[in-house]
Image: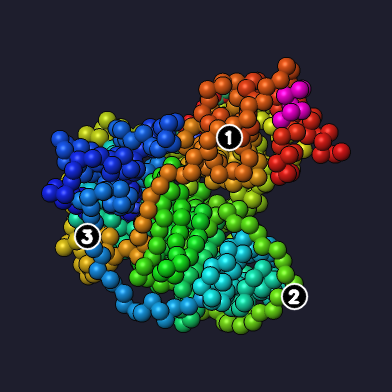
Amino acid sequence: MPLLEVDNDKCVGCGNCVDVCPFGALSLDGDKVVVNDKCTDCGACIDACPTMALSLPQRPAVKTEDTGQYSGVWVWIEIFNKQITDNSAEILGQGRVLADARRMALTACVLGHDVGHIAKDAISFGADRVLLADDPSLDVYRNAPYAAIIIDLARRHKPEIFLFGASSRGRDLAGSVATDLYAGLTADCTGLDIDPEKGLLVQTRPAFGGNIMAMIICPDHRPQMATVRHRVFEKPLVDMERRGEIISIGPSMTEEQISTRVTGFIQETDKVNLANARVIVSGGRGVGGPEGFEPLKKLADVLGGTIGASRSAVDAGWISYDHQVGQTGRTVRPDMYIACGISGAVQHQAGMKTSKVIVAINKNPDAPIFDIAHFGIVGDLFKIVPALTEQFKKRLSA
Amino acid sequence: MNIIVCIKQVPGITDVQIDPEDNTLVRENIPSIVNPFDMYAIEEGLRLKEAHGGRVTVISMGPPQVASALKDALGMGADDAVLLTDRAFAGADSWATAYTLSLAVKMMGEFDIIICGRQAIDGDTGQVGPGLARQLGINQLTYISKIKEIDPSGKTITVERLLEEGREIVEAGLPALITVVKDINQPRLATVANIRKASRIKIKVMSAADLTGVDVNRLGINGSPTKVIKIFSPPKREGILELIKADNINEAAIQLVDRIMAEKIL
Ligand SMILES: Cc1cc2nc3c(=O)[nH]c(=O)nc-3n(C[C@H](O)[C@H](O)[C@H](O)COP(=O)(O)OP(=O)(O)OC[C@H]3O[C@@H](n4cnc5c(N)ncnc54)[C@H](O)[C@@H]3O)c2cc1C
Ligand SMILES: Nc1ncnc2c1ncn2[C@@H]1O[C@H](COP(=O)(O)O)[C@@H](O)[C@H]1O
């Protein structure tokens, strides 16, 4: 039931809108456009129409509070093993850029136990102020106690923009916070900018498995919330001279009020940490079997990289699911992604095509992986991968 | 146990091709499928029912044709299906979707667990699950790769959560909402018997007017804080491929390593 309306008196049947619709929801019937059920009311067609024949119903301004009361950019700091994650450091860097553009302060929310040093890290990465909740109940991330504090703080201080990592924890937390604050939350942003005219946060993100990009704003609700993937923004330089204010706050829930407990942690056996890997050597059906990953592992070892895989290799049982890259696996953005014996189906590409350098090794010169690769060799991976390993060994030890 | 599974119908990106000419989607005949992650959610619900008894209710919000996704779930063995469909729901973002689902769930009586997929493959947000849990005021456990133990009478659950660095074991009180990842199970196929049974099950259809306590200002496009202002194709990478050609493998390897070293990424 699309909301999109066509003014038949204005429609000239030019077909511009049909071409721009990402969902195949528009077609021409004679010289008038018709909308089918695939329409998602995304609005992409509205600007494409030269005669302004297309429209979506005007949204009533549902503002309950004056958005002008809100001020400041906030970042939730993710901590693992008592260290600030790179993802959070990167977001502080971009948060600084946004805060400067808005001439506002940058605040970091640090929650944990024995994490005073993280508050200092946050300042050296660009924060002006840290809200620090240091309590045994916050030792390991848990949704309820973390969400309670963040929601309390946001209600009290009214930040204009609030950023989180698009990690498992970050998404878990941001989803709860946005719900209680009735705030718009844009997932997995790859771009965050300030609209110079209105001062709104313009959020750019991939959708539809990375096949289209969407620009999103939150005009009437505050804070404007977003999650940001690892390695989208540069990690800022550390400035040990920077000074900032650290404000200590108490927890919002007592241990008795929290009905979840984290009782164990299983470090991934062979440490598959695809999200943080700088180099990923990935194998597909072309590796032929579990033993086919051996030469890839040797190459990965030389490069200090991690092993990835296509779904076909995972489904065949050659390697565990933790390694799967793609739409139903992990999304990665390493400095270098080496695809060996992977055809490069859209679902695989969805998880890796923003890698900085993509290298493809495939027997078939027509494999779609070559469409997105920066460097390619057509040939047998079992010959090429060992040869590459040798060369890298020589060059990197030199 | 009363088990609720939330499913979404999405365009089957399976068959989506990128037009090499202008890097846009070839969008003809995109079929609609049940979001792949929701298949694991349905399967997990059915397994819980098989182990502990009870009923599995699938619920989906969307246009009327979403009934076919619900039928698929019934064909796998779900017992009841609820379809939330109304013009007022159209254009909902994750906030409005979670709000709408929560109103329907509140009308469904006692439940032990709600299961969602980790994310929908069209929007890729993964926010509806957490939003729904929060609206209902229940525990949320996201990215679950295994239910280790569940005790419906003692009202506890122990799960494994898949995080970037490893797997975390978490115990929580029920009712809870979990979102599941792919390695939790292998979804079953629909059976002829279940499909036949499914054809006799009447899908319960609800509109905005049927939702107790609804605030119509929070539904659909009007209730959605986020607003899409522009959709565009990702910048295309034209002619970026440098194909390494050499007389022998070693020569090719040397050339490739040269090029990669020149990128200064290692
Ligand atoms: C809903 C859905 C979700 C999906 N999600 C994902 C996902 O998350 N990740 C994913 O990867 N896939 C996913 N897929 C599957 C995807 O569509 C492809 O089927 C899969 O990626 C193919 O894997 P592959 O490239 O390893 O295998 P193939 O397509 O079979 O390709 C094997 C390649 O290896 C080459 N080759 C063979 N032998 C050699 C050799 N000796 N040397 C060099 N090259 C060789 C061949 O030329 C061929 O190009 C999904 C599919 C669906 C429907
Ligand atoms: N319209 C909907 N109806 C029912 N469940 C939904 C709907 N949208 C999302 N969900 C559930 O929420 C999960 C996450 O979706 P999303 O937040 O859109 O990525 C899905 O896997 C479904 O389980």
* Residue found farthest to the top: B247
Residue A208 appearing in the image: yes
- Label placed on residue A241: 2
Q: Real-space Cα distance between discs 3 and 2? A: 52 Å
Residue A47 is one of the magenta-drawn residues: no
- Residue B111: image x %, image y %? 33, 60
Q: Which residue is mark 3?
A: A57
* Residue found farthest to the left: A9
Q: Real-space Cα distance between discs 1 and 3? A: 42 Å
Q: Nearer the viewer, residue A337 or B264?
A: B264
- Say yes or no: labels 3 and 2 on the same chain: yes
Q: Residue at x 41, y 72 (%)?
A: A222
Q: Residue at x 53, y 38 (%)?
A: B237
- Say yes or no: labels 2 and 1 on the same chain: no
- Residue B88: image x %, image y %? 21, 59
Q: Are marks 2 and 1 in contact (CB under 8 Å)?
A: no
Q: Chain of mark 2?
A: A
Q: Chain of mark 3?
A: A
- Residue B134: image x %, image y %? 39, 66
Q: Nearer the viewer, residue B211 or A155?
A: A155
Please, is residue B263 above or below residue A76 in the view? above
Q: Residue at x 27, y 30 (%)?
A: B192
Query: What amino acid does circle 3 point to?
Result: Pro
- Label placed on residue B240: 1
Query: What amino acid does circle 2 point to?
Result: Glu
What color scheme is it?
rainbow
Q: Nearer the viewer, residue B131 or A202?
A: A202
Please, is residue B238 above or below residue B139 in the view? above
